[in-house]
Image: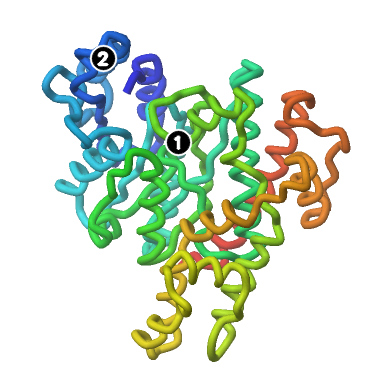
């Protein structure tokens, strides 16, 4: 949607791939009624231009799905990025074999020439993987407002991920729709992707994580664009818009001690022969599920201990962990910079300037912190990849 300026760059990226055994599916999409909304006509015309570019492309053959021309667009509640991904993935599923790999891409993301080759190799190395959450990196734009916003958002994501890795908490993946892949057999096993209006990538990976292993390391990264966008309800673009306006309340640096509490719960679950320990996190879950004992019915239904643990991990999933952190994980006594600074020093021995500020420090200084977090995260991912690869 509204991507004609990005299409040619994407096609160049695809044509430059050094792995050629693939088919390209593209969905240009928008709500059909936008053709009758004056302020949306520019987007409609841009989508029409995108269709022409794709139809006239002389390179790799494209299976083009038109969900934007008059009469062809989304109708009613069936609209948004979730339906776009579902439409494309279902079309692939209809013609693919079980061992093929669905690689999700976006028009505003750059993929290095070895991207598809690296994923094909990763699949061969990890044939049991149910998904690949590919490492990502937002390139800076040179426009200060956008760069500050994307760096703050990416540091939030990497901070969250690092806490999951540090504490060995399940669901250690970052969901980015332009940087994920799944084998067709896994897509079929979960019944496909659920078309949420936003966050479909998160829920998709969550479903895939519950039937197997999500691989989080890859030798090549995806490079999503850093731009202000309100095309979805939440995600990178809306976060940048709100953050640029001074509102980062939805993306705080949660108290590391709350991650420790979640970790203790899972450790107790893995090691205890009877009930896991009772703590604030368990109390939150009992209240959430309106029960006095979350684990009792799971234990009744699963006499085998490993099956019981699996059922518990499926119940206490990434969404529940995030909900808990949103309720109990915000340390309001510290400024966000202080929380980040103390975290890096206490857990990784990294010292950043005392006067560091997302608003006042230079873009280069903020970028340096982003790169330090990215390096730490990559180390965790690669260690895990080497430990679990087949």
Helix or strand or loop: what does disc 2 sit on? helix
- Residue 155 image position (x, y, % from top left): 65, 40
> Would you identify the image quadrant in which residue 75 lies?
top left
Q: Mark 2 or 1 closer to N-term?
A: 2
Report the residue at 51% width, 53% height from top: 173
61 left or right of 202 in image: left
Residue 12 vertical placement versus 98 (above, below): above
Residue 63 in view in this figure: yes
Counting every numbered tag in the picture gives 2
310 left or right of 324 in image: left
- Residue 158 image position (x, y, % from top left): 62, 45
Pointer 2 residue: 44
200 left or right of 282 in image: left
What is the crowding at mark 1: few (fewer than 14 residues within 10 Å), some, or many (at least 20)?
A: some
Q: Quadrant of the N terminus?
A: top left
- Which of 293/44 is in front? 293
- Residue 66 image position (x, y, % from top left): 18, 26
Report the residue at 37% width, 36% height from top: 105
Residue 360 vertical placement versus 154 (above, below): above
Which disc, if any, is residue 234? Answer: 1
Coloration mode: rainbow
> Would you identify the image quadrant in which residue 40 lies?
top left
Helix or strand or loop: what does disc 1 sit on? loop
Residue 186 vertical placement versus 305 (above, below): above
Residue 314 vertical placement versus 334 (above, below): below
Which disc, if any, is residue 167? Answer: none
């Amino acid at each position: 949607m509204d991507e004609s300026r990005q299409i040619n760059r994407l096609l160049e990226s695809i044509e430059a791939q050094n792995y050629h055994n693939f088919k390209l599916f593209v969905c240009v999409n928008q709500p059909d009624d936008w053709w009758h909304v004056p302020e949306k006509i520019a987007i409609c015309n841009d989508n029409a231009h995108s269709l022409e570019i794709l139809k006239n492309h002389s390179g790799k053959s494209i299976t083009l799905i038109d969900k934007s021309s008059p009469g062809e667009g989304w109708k009613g509640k069936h609209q948004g990025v979730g339906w776009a991904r579902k439409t494309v993935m279902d079309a692939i599923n209809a013609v693919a074999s079980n061992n093929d790999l669905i690689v999700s891409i976006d028009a505003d993301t750059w993929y290095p020439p070895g991207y598809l080759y690296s994923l094909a190799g990763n699949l061969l190395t990890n044939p049991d993987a149910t998904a690949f959450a590919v490492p990502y990196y937002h390139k800076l734009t040179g426009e200060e407002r956008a760069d500050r916003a994307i760096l703050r958002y990416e540091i939030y994501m990497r901070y969250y991920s690092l806490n999951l890795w540090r504490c060995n908490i399940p669901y250690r993946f970052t969901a980015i729709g332009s940087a994920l892949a799944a084998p067709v057999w896994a897509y079929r096993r979960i019944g496909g992707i659920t078309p949420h209006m936003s966050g479909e990538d998160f829920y998709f990976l969550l479903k895939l994580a519950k039937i197997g292993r999500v691989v989080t390391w890859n030798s090549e990264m995806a490079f999503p664009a850093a731009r202000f966008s309100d095309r979805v309800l939440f995600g990178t673009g809306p976060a940048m818009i709100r953050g640029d306006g001074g509102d980062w309340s939805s993306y705080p640096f949660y108290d590391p001690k709350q991650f420790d509490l979640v970790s203790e719960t899972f450790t107790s679950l893995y090691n205890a022969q009877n009930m896991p320990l009772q703590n604030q996190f368990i109390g939150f879950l009992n209240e959430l599920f309106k029960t006095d004992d979350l684990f009792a019915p799971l234990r009744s239904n699963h006499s085998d201990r490993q099956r019981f643990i699996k059922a518990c991990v499926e119940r206490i999933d990434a969404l529940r962990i995030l909900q808990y952190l949103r309720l109990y994980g915000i340390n309001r006594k510290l400024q966000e910079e202080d929380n980040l600074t103390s975290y890096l020093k206490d857990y990784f021995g990294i010292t950043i300037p005392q006067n560091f500020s997302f608003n006042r420090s230079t873009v280069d200084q903020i970028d340096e912190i982003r790169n330090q977090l990215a390096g730490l995260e990559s180390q965790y991912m690669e260690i895990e990849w080497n430990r679990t690869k087949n």
